[in-house]
Amino acid sequence: MSAEELRYEADGLSMNGALFRPSGGAGKAPGVLVFPEAFGLSGHAIERAGRLAAELGYVALACDLWGERRQVTSLPEVMPMLQALMGDVGGMQARLTTPLQLLQAQAGVDAGRIAAIGFCFGGTCAFELATCSDIKAAIGFHSGLKVPSLAAGGAAGIRGSKILAMIGQDDPAIPPETRAEFIRVLSEAGVDWQMTLYGGVVHSFTNPEADAAGMPAVLRYDARADRRSWRQMTGLLAEAFG
Amino acid sequence: MSAEELRYEADGLSMNGALFRPSGGAGKAPGVLVFPEAFGLSGHAIERAGRLAAELGYVALACDLWGERRQVTSLPEVMPMLQALMGDVGGMQARLTTPLQLLQAQAGVDAGRIAAIGFCFGGTCAFELATCSDIKAAIGFHSGLKVPSLAAGGAAGIRGSKILAMIGQDDPAIPPETRAEFIRVLSEAGVDWQMTLYGGVVHSFTNPEADAAGMPAVLRYDARADRRSWRQMTGLLAEAFG
């Protein structure tokens, strides 16, 4: 399974995504956008896009976040970048809807059957995209739940996207109060949402690279939660794509 | 798929369970106990046991709760019965461990690979059984989370059972405070637990018979949550049985 570079401009940046196609098969396949962690498009998100194609038969596009696949390495560096991006909903949405349209336009993609998944801030991206598009599902792994358009009363913009958030119970970045507010807003808007909590699990549970940070109380890979969340995603994608 | 009556004595009652075996297949299959809603062994729990055998290849035993498959029809009648049973942990456990041992002793059952699922109070039963046995998983659908032995500090008794609770977010019988306490106790004991919440869903979401009660704000079948929770159970059973 080899990735194809997919270059596009979004929000003034030269983006460089990684596109994967399932092998063989005629006809059109559903498409899945993959949004990376806040640090930018990394091997982790690219590997997951590859698995979506190889294991599940979807056309998958791992999206660039900061342009030219820039990876930010430190939390102090990325935090103000995130704050600025979250404060500019138009710019943030451009980084989401542009690859969505590109994926929909690809040969072999069923433009009516697209979903988005994301990790950490990438989950926030998937949920934000659900407020301004017709994607069938938005799925977040250890995803940030402070979604700009939801905080601004935009939950009613979610037109049919199935929402799934999977969170480590002990994730200090996504405390129970934040989950409760996310739930409240989606429930009031009548959105189809689910949330799964994993006991004894913190942030970044899908990413083996997380352990390198040496902050196991905050960032820690968890093979069990990784497998379980992937399985739950797989089920919801199949349901959403009918 | 036809059920075989399995009669046993437990807690002084003449119980009459419904046993299902997968068709064909040599060798030993995992076994699954199915505990019914508080009203007693009904068509709902029996149908689910049948599906565990037919769809998933497990030997499944739907357990009697009140003896001779008695079904209690009203909430005012069943509530004091429940209270009494929950207050008698020894008696309650006898109604759980007796069918467990019977299932383990059945020909064609791998006694080392048993799980329990349950609905409403049956979920409470599955979790209680996890505190006093070596079952591989305990899975509750719209399950009561006030589990006698957990409330009494017995979470450390859970030796390797994977715990999964699936709850309607709007279930008035299982409010957020009750969920939080369940989570706290399991987390402190280092138990492997998961909880999934479904937006816009109340109690009894797996049971089409629930709608007959005419209390849709409390008891309501939800086909979507029914399918999703069954799917999540299926994944966890496969994981637990290795």
Image: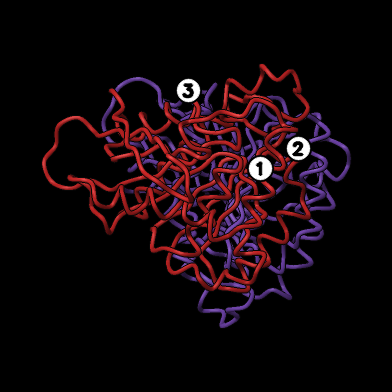
Chain colours: A purple, B red
Q: Answer left or right for B91 relative to A97.
A: left
Q: Do labels 3 and 1 touch, CB within 8 Å? A: no
The subunit carrying tag 3 is A
| Amino acid identity at mark 2 | Asp
Q: Is residue A160 visible?
A: yes
Q: Position of residue A18 (x, y in %)?
A: 46, 48
Outermost right residue? A152
Q: Quadrant of residue A176?
A: bottom right
The residue to which callout 1 is attached is: B81
Residue situated in front as seen by the camera: B202 or B118: B118
Looking at the image, residue A229 lies above or below residue B149? above
| Amino acid identity at mark 3 | Gly
Task: Specify the label residue B170 is tagged with.
Answer: 2
Q: Position of residue A196 (x, y in %)?
A: 60, 50
Mark nearer the viewer, 1 or 2: 1
The subunit carrying tag 1 is B
Q: Are marks 3 and 1 on the same chain?
A: no
The residue to which callout 3 is attached is: A242
Q: Residues within 10 Å of mark 3 (few under 14, many from 20)?
A: few
At 23% across and 46% down in the image, what residue appears?
B106
